[in-house]
Image (spheres, rainbow, N blue to C red):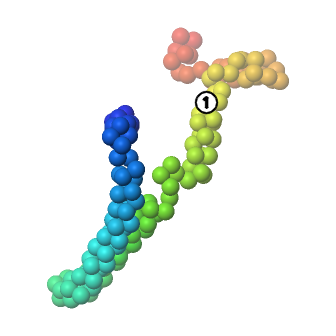
Amino acid sequence: MGNILLKFSKGIEKLGIGKLLSRVLNICGPLFVIGFYTLIYYHIRVFCTVIIAVLFKRLGVAFSLMWMMAGGVIGLNVVFNYTMAMIIKANGPKEIKKIEMMRSRYKNRQTKKEMRESERYEGISSEVKQTMRYRAKSLDDLRHVW
């Protein structure tokens, strides 16, 4: 997908319409936002004026209130997610990048299996080392002993 977008952007640069396209998108962006919130407003208006009146008559009070709560939660979720998608930059918050770096550093660190025996059992007596090696073996490794 990234390769296709790269070819597309190079083609736009060759045609010389990059600045024009950028200006058109800068104008269309706020228009899409206004259109979205207008659509949400009319949706809520129709729900409050038409559907609520019919809902109570058809379903009763308990089910009507349940459906209204579910619709309210879903509506708030849609508006919140759309607003946050507009506010947060495309490359993501700094905290997410920091967490990803910490996760990759933790993932790439030396694990117990990669440690040498001398590092693993440093400062322990030889009898304890033998016991630890025995306990670390799986049942398949011990079948020949039994």
Q: Is residue 135 above or below residue 55?
A: above
Asked if one can make out residue 75 in the rendered structure from this viewpoint, the answer is: no
Q: Is residue 73 above or below residue 17?
A: below
Q: Is residue 50 above or below residue 140?
A: below
Question: Splitting the image into 4 quarters, where does residue 14 fall?
Answer: top left
User: Is residue 29 rendered to the left or right of residue 140?
Assistant: left
Tell me the residue at 34%/67% (across/down). 31
Q: Position of residue 68 (x, y in %)?
A: 30, 79
Tag 1: residue type?
Asn
* Element type where label 1 sits in the image: loop
Q: Position of residue 26 (x, y in %)?
A: 40, 59
Q: 133 or 117, which is in the foreground?
A: 117
- In what quadrant of the picture does the C terminus appear? top right
Tell me the residue at 73%/23% (across/down). 120
User: Is residue 83 rendered to the left or right of residue 32?
Assistant: right
Q: Position of residue 88 (x, y in %)?
A: 50, 58
Count neighbours of disc 1 (C-alpha within 10 A) and say few if under 14, some if 14 to 19, many if 20 or more: few
Tell me the residue at 35%/57% (across/down). 24
Q: 11 or 146, which is in the foreground?
A: 11
Q: 93 or 3, which is in the foreground?
A: 3
- In what quadrant of the picture does the N terminus appear? top left
Question: Splitting the image into 4 quarters, where does residue 25 fall?
Answer: bottom left
- Judging by the rendered image, the residue that carries numbered circle 1 is 108
Q: 123 or 24, which is in the foreground?
A: 24
User: Is residue 134 rendered to the left or right of residue 56?
Assistant: right
Tell me the residue at 64%/21% (across/down). 114
Q: Position of residue 40 (x, y in %)?
A: 31, 74
Asked if one can make out residue 7 in the rendered structure from this viewpoint, the answer is: yes
